[in-house]
Amino acid sequence: MSNILSLASHPKLLPVGSLARHESFGLVQVIERSGSMRRVGWFESTEILSYDPEIVFEESIVEHDAWVAAGELSQLNPHKDVTAHMLMDLNADQATPVDAAAPPHPVLSLVVNRD
């Protein structure tokens, strides 16, 4: 009698809390696991243009999550890879301004008063 263990379901491969890179989503964090599937989460931010002189910068931050196969993820070493991948994400995802008349449900807004 022998035990068969799928490599993608091994406990050390992409454990909960680890950081990974996904081809479509970019830098993600593993939130949950079930066999060879991983539930990952990531954030997407969009700058909102405001015509109000009191608002210096405003952005919408949306949290996403999805189930993906472990084979679609490449595990990152937090001491080596994270900064490089974050810079790649910043260069690839240039914020596209959104019209302030119809903002997409902002989660975070920053208002700075000028004296």
Image (spheres, rainbow, N blue to C red):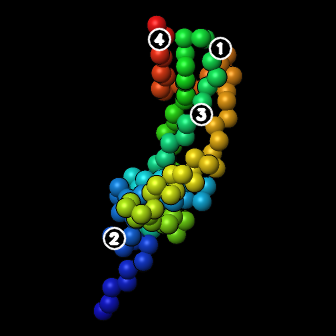
The three-letter code of the residue at mark 4 reads Asn
First along the sequence among labels 3 and 1: 3
Q: Secondary structure at mark 4?
A: loop
Q: Identify the disc placed on residue 46.
A: 3
How far is mark 2 from mark 1, CA to CA? Answer: 50 Å
The three-letter code of the residue at mark 1 reads Tyr
11 in relation to 91, above or below: below
How far is mark 4 from mark 2, CA to CA? Answer: 49 Å
Mark 3 vs 2: CB contact within 8 A: no
First along the sequence among labels 4 and 1: 1
| Residue at image mark 2 | 12
71 in relation to 18, above or below: below
Outermost residue to the top: 115
How far is mark 3 from mark 2, CA to CA? Answer: 35 Å
| Residue at image mark 1 | 51
Q: Nearer the viewer, mark 2 or mark 1?
A: 1
Q: Residue at x 45, y 57 (%)?
A: 82
Mark 4 vs 1: CB contact within 8 A: no
First along the sequence among labels 3 and 4: 3
First along the sequence among labels 2 and 1: 2
Q: Secondary structure at mark 2?
A: loop
Look at the image and tell me whether residue 38 can be seen.
no
Question: What percent of the width, then of the height, locates residue 75?
Answer: 45, 65
Q: Secondary structure at mark 1?
A: loop
